[in-house]
Image: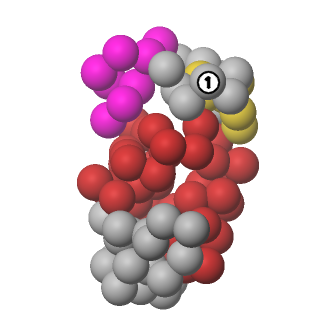
Amino acid sequence: MKEYIHRNMPLTTGVARALIRDLFTGKGYVKRAEIIERICEYHTKNGGTATLKTQCVSAVRKTLSDIQAEKHPDTGGYWKID
């Protein structure tokens, strides 16, 4: 199994962006709450620095907001990562 490259790192927006791309590209529409939950859980379970739930949620929400501003219209809480 490949070692998690974000091991011992906090969940930043850069890490969240990489994980969103890795875990959700091509998965169709996914609710924002599911993306947040999966990213936070995946990061911690694979050796990322544990963060408060609020910090994790903030990092993922900020990342999704940035992605939306770049290329995605408002999707009513559902996201499709290309």
| The quarter of the displayed image where residue 55 is located | bottom left
Answer above or below: position of 7 versus 41.
below
Does 67 lie within the magenta span? yes
Q: Is residue 69 left or right of residue 54?
A: left
Mark 1 lies on a secondary structure that is loop
The type of residue carrying mark 1 is Gly
User: Which secondary structure class fits the magenta region best?
Assistant: helix
Please provide percent x and percent y for residue 30.
Answer: 70, 33
Residue numbers of the magenta segment: 66-73
Please provide percent x and percent y for residue 66.
Answer: 32, 35
> Is residue 1 in view?
yes
> Is residue 55 in view?
no
Which quadrant would the N terminus be assigned to in this image?
Answer: bottom right
Answer above or below: position of 32 versus 46.
above
Does 70 lie within the magenta span? yes
Residue under label 1, please give it. 26
Residue found at x 32% / y 24%: 69
